[in-house]
Amino acid sequence: MTSKAKGYRVERKIRMEFEKRGWLVVRAGASLGDADLICLKDGKCLLVQVKSTKKDALYYYGPIKGEIAGFPYILVVDFGYGTIRVTKPKRKILRTSGISLEEFLEEKNK
């Protein structure tokens, strides 16, 4: 499987988790910008960058800022084996960084 196909598969998995909880999710075509997914719900907008790795750490080289154009910007990292973490952008993301996607989505649904 090519890395492009793998990236699309992971983006699709994350998109489906947001959509299950009532979010409208738009995929940023070809990921030409900083965000892979734009998630909308109840007047909220989240910009999401999706990454994946099988290692215990991911080194991120994208923008290190918590927002873009005034909207929250988050990283969602799929470490495989059911471990998906949500964190603010930083250079090194560990398998234990941030919170689980499940916790994040529950928190956002309150």
Image: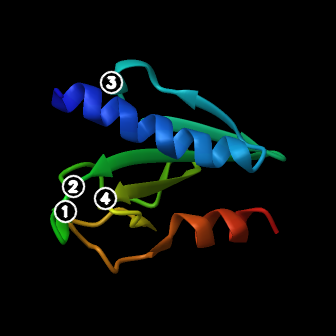
Which is more N-terminal, label 3 or label 4? 3
Contact, mark 1 vs mark 2 (Cβ under 8 Å): yes
Residues at marks 4 and 3, CA–CA distance in whole angstroms: 25 Å
Q: Amino acid at mark 2?
A: Thr
Q: Is residue 34 visible?
A: no
Determine crowd level at label 4: few under 14, some 14-19, many 20+ residues with C-alpha closer than 10 A: some
Label placed on residue 58: 1
Q: Nearer the viewer, residue 67 or 36?
A: 36
Give the residue displayed 50% in from the left and 71% down from the top.
100
**Secondary structure found at label 2:** loop
Residues at marks 1 and 2, CA–CA distance in whole angstroms: 7 Å
The residue most toward the bottom is 96
Give the residue displayed 18% in from the left and 72% down from the top.
56
Quarter in which the C terminus is drawn: bottom right
Q: Amino acid at mark 3?
A: Leu
**Secondary structure found at label 1:** strand
Residues at marks 4 and 2, CA–CA distance in whole angstroms: 7 Å
**Secondary structure found at label 4:** loop
Residue 105 relative to residue 4: left or right: right
Contact, mark 4 vs mark 2 (Cβ under 8 Å): yes
Residues at marks 4 and 1, CA–CA distance in whole angstroms: 12 Å
Say which residue label 2 marks. 53
Residues at marks 2 and 3, CA–CA distance in whole angstroms: 21 Å
Contact, mark 3 vs mark 1 (Cβ under 8 Å): no
Say which residue label 4 marks. 80
Label placed on residue 32: 3
Label placed on residue 83: none
Residues at marks 3 and 1, CA–CA distance in whole angstroms: 21 Å
Q: Position of residue 17 (x, y in %)?
A: 60, 48
- Vertical order, 39 against 86 (above or below): above
